[in-house]
Amino acid sequence: MDRLSLATLDRLPAGILRPDYDRTTVATGIVHLGLGAFHRGHQAVYTDALLKDDPRWGILGVSLRSPDARDALRPQGGLYSVSASDGAGHRRRVIGALTDVAVAPENPAGLLARLADPAVRIVSTTVTEKGYSHDPATGALRADDPDIRHDSLNLTHPRSTLGVIVGGLRLRRQQGLPPYVVLACDNLPTNGHTLRGLVIAFAELVDRDLATWIAGEVRFPSTMVDRIVPATTETDRNEVRAALGLDDAWPIVTEPFSQWVIEDDFGGDRPAWDRSGAQFVRDVAPFELMKLRLLNGAHSTLAYLGYLMGCPTVAAAMAKPDLAGLVEDMMRDEVTPTLPTLGGFDIAAYRTALLARFRNPALKHRTMQIAMDGSLKLPQRLLDTIRDRLARDQPITRLALAVAAWMRYVSGTDELGAPIELRDPLAGRLRALADDAGPVAGRLAPTLLSLTSIFGSDLPADARFTTAVMTALESLLRNGTRTTVEQTRRATR
Ligand code: CS2
């Protein structure tokens, strides 16, 4: 079957939307770092919708590690399809916003030259929590990270996100160009502010003057991004091929819902993303907190408990009534009271909508995918919520169960004794600690709680927290996940 490309675009069946602009007129105004499924199913879609009116904002998509996205998309001229799917069907469209795709390690100097192009006004990121090279508990730069050390000495050939951003800014400053706006689009609280701190801390390792220039000149708006975009499966590829009548090597299958809230701090011209449904606001923080704690907090809870209960996907986990009920109760009673109120916003309706999104039968969102990188996800998804509740002396039973489920998960074998494939930057360390402790709550919990990069020094010293986690872990190990979920649900209602 022929491949999706500019030459075959007109063979798409009617009803499948395609770029409504002349792609040859599109300039590259955005360089995006982290060309994963999320970017292609989210920011690129918002951008695609405004290129007809404003062709300055095409995107150079950059993979920081693997050539896979480039290998899939180059032969398609950067085109790919996005299917918004749920139980009611699919809405498919072809996105043309990527003007080019690049693989950073193949030509780091070439990438910096692209960043120094004056037409480039925004450098955005979806590099996941890992890409920030920070200590999640404190937010501090991990100056001992090998890539950070490398980049501080070789800024013309950077490997890390921070190295690329700062390397590009240095070139622009040398060439007397204004800086670009750095737009963080990862699931971290105050992501722009966090990224700014890390960029400046990294720049200080290289050149103090440059760091001062960045602190004074560069803008780092924060954003809240939301769309569930699972990793593409073979089944997705086959279904999309049948629907398109063309081969798309890397289609995106996502949900109809999409939300993007952006701090309006660009210091000038910016893409009119609000015309394609995004919201520019003065303060993103309340939106981010709500999304991270309710959606991502619930996601991680469903992922660990669901995986341990044998559920391969979020939808399968939601089909377990006690688990779905426990998560709903947790969102309402434990998480919501920690959130600032957003004037005129119906948070109960937001929660109901989230539960429906988790149940979306068209998405095969693997619990294992969400479970990965827990050491970097737990702090903002669950632990900060726990801190807020402890500060008000409120119960944390369900949140503590979610943390205990993570501990049970990283201990390495499931309830049938089969190995769990642990994907986490701390995997080696976690595995060693867990092996050492053995499957005994009284040893496993304190050992893992000693990881200050995850838990800080406050939580391990709080008996209300350690006791709640230990009790939950003990039950998971002794009674199994199903029974623990059932009993916790009953006990907390
Ligand atoms: C998920 C998120 O993989 C994960 O950890 O919780 O990617 C989630 O799907 C998105 O944040 C939804 O906006």
Image: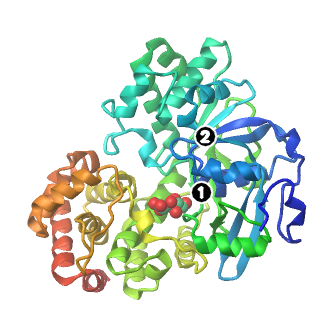
Q: Is residue 8 above or below residue 269?
A: below
Percent position of residue 293, x then y: 43, 60
Q: Nearer the viewer, residue 452 or 285?
A: 452
Which quadrant of the structure image shows residue 106?
top right
Element on which disc 2 rests:
strand
Q: Is residue 27 above or below residue 188?
A: above
Percent position of residue 323, x then y: 38, 81
How packed mark 1 is, by other alpha carbons closer than 10 Å (few <14, some 14-19, many 20 or more), is: many
- Marks 1 and 2 sit apart, C-alpha to C-alpha, by 15 Å
Amino acid under disc 2: Ser
Residue wearing tag 2: 124
Does residue 345 appear to the left or right of 199 in the view shown? right
Locate the C terminus and report the quarter of the image it occupies: bottom left
Q: Which mark is residue 37?
A: 1
Amino acid under disc 1: Ala
Q: Nearer the viewer, residue 334 or 226?
A: 226
Q: Earlier in the sequence, mark 1 or mark 2?
A: 1
Residue at the spot 58% in from the left edge and 81% down from the top edge: 361
Q: Is residue 320 above or below residue 289?
A: below
Please name which of the two marks, 1 or 2, marks the residue nearer to the observer: 1
